[in-house]
Image (cartoon, coloured by chain):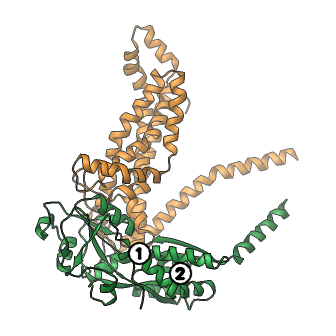
Chain colours: A orange, B green
Amino acid sequence: MNRKKERLIKYLFTALAFSSLVFLIGIVLVLFKEALPIFSRVSLHDFLLGESWYPTAEPPEFGILPLILASLWVTLGALVICVPLGVGSALYLHELAGPRQRALLKPVIEILASVPSIVYGFFGMVILAPFLQNAFDLPIGLCALTTSIILGVMATPTVASIAEDALSYVPRSFREASFAVGADRWQTLTKVIIPAAGSGISTAIILGMSRAIGETMTVLMVAGGSAVIPHSVFDPVRPMTAAIAAEMGEASVGSDHYHALFAIALILFLITFVFNIAAELISRRFRLKLGLSR
Amino acid sequence: MKKLIITLMALGMAGAASAEKVVLEGSTTVLPIAQKAAEVFMKNNPGADLSVRGGGSGVGIASIIDGTCDIADSSRAIKPDELAKAAKRGRDLKAHVIAMDGITHIVNPANTITNLTRAQIKEIYTSRAANWKKFGGPDLKIVVISRDSSSGTFEAFSEMVLDKKKVRPDAIMQAANQGVASTVARTPGAIGYVGLGYVSSSVKAISVDSVMPSRETVLKNKYPITRPLFMYTNGAPAGTIKQFIDFVKSPEGQKIVNEEGFVGLK
């Protein structure tokens, strides 16, 4: 009886564990199925490299280069903010902070991660955008810079907490060995700890990038939404996620526009998929290097 | 235990079915009218349960075709391809004109511009015209604000002013009338277009072809960019839906239309 129950429970948990695989495969299948029909109308080349996005004009134009570049542009900007902030916080927490600072800062960083994205978007729209508009004398504050700053702050907790984990995986023996040969704290940090945790920190940065490029609500509210190829940080942009969110509601099921939006989602998925695979490979190497089991 | 859960579920479903819930979705131009009318209607009919949301005319019509809303608010007439789609799904959409509106062009109060011709507006929205000086305004970069394509206001504007020409790609896109109004209010060089009910003291309405949009000019069809506002139902309305549509068209409902800044019928 007990045996039977145990086996039943084992199967149950196996099924639960594999369910995420099922979801992933399901999502991929649907993305491909709904995205592919658009390529009978537009070639992959024209879709990816076309410079005008007029999905509802007559005749419609489905070039998503401005959207892809907008996403990459704001993500790059976000990295400039979240890498120093996130890695710096991790180093401080791990190396310098006493127990009291840690007890305060760790939960604060986690709360930053749990603020809903619409709150960030609202803040960006009402406070940051007008501020930057005045500060830089811009025609309009809803632009790539505003978006990058907000996305950078949103990605900071991801980078900080994963980078801090990476630092804490560096075995004590590394540090002790370094001190033993007479290195000081700064030398130990820059010559031993950071190189040892380097790939873990890279993982943190890549996951932060994933977070930034996939964010939707905030970019919809603060990016401005102009489907043009960005030439400066002050240009309003229309990242891929914003285009999907703004247009999905009215694109009638089965229309070219509908399939084109799915194709954008597919491209976005592939980009984040590559990011995550890279992060996984790097972190695996990292764990091996430190002599930890994988 | 199981039985209890099943009973509760059955009760829950019965409960949901008895309070007839009516969902209105679509145009953000119609939204303030629909919201206020639904509020008053629910106060008068305590049993009724109405829920109102925006999204844009295109979203409302797509939803009523998919069966996820009961009344689609729209600031444009239904398009032939939408009609074909509705017919395929066995839906027979009925239009109810509930108000008139003038698409109003607004600029920042700091802008000295007071009038533009339709040709000028078309030039601003479709060419690379960069500075207000060209149109007799201050030396200020023009920031063009438009609406996402799900907007009925955009479709009507595109038809009546742009002759369906494409809006310049660097236009700022907003999802709702309110978004256009507040962006124009914060941006000195901005120009945008909204339903008449969204004009407030934080933006400046300008005249088009020397006619100022107002109740009078819209009703007399003097203002060049006027359009009806619709509510669409699936088939002839019945029950709570009929009561609500009748209420919106009644003198009390039309008073709400006027109070919200739009133009009542008659």
Q: Please give left or right for residue B101 compared with residue B32 in the image.
A: left
Helix, strand or loop for disc 1: loop
Q: Earlier in the sequence, mark 1 or mark 2?
A: 1
Q: Nearer the viewer, residue B29 or A213?
A: B29
Q: Mark 2 — residue?
A: B71
Q: Please give left or right for residue B253 compared with residue B204 in the image.
A: right
Helix, strand or loop for disc 2: strand
Q: Which quarter of the figure is the C terminus of chain A placed in?
A: top right
In the rendered image, residue B162, in percent from the top left (x then y), is placed at: 24, 79
Q: What amino acid type is highlighted by mark number 2? A: Ile
Q: Quadrant of residue B9?
A: bottom right
Residue A267: image tag: none
Residue B29: image tag: 1
In the rendered image, residue B16, in percent from the top left (x then y), is placed at: 70, 73
Q: Nearer the viewer, mark 1 or mark 2?
A: 1
Visible in this render: residue B89? no
In the rendered image, residue A87, in percent from the top left (x then y), is placed at: 41, 32
Q: What amino acid type is highlighted by mark number 1? A: Thr
Visible in this render: residue B26? yes
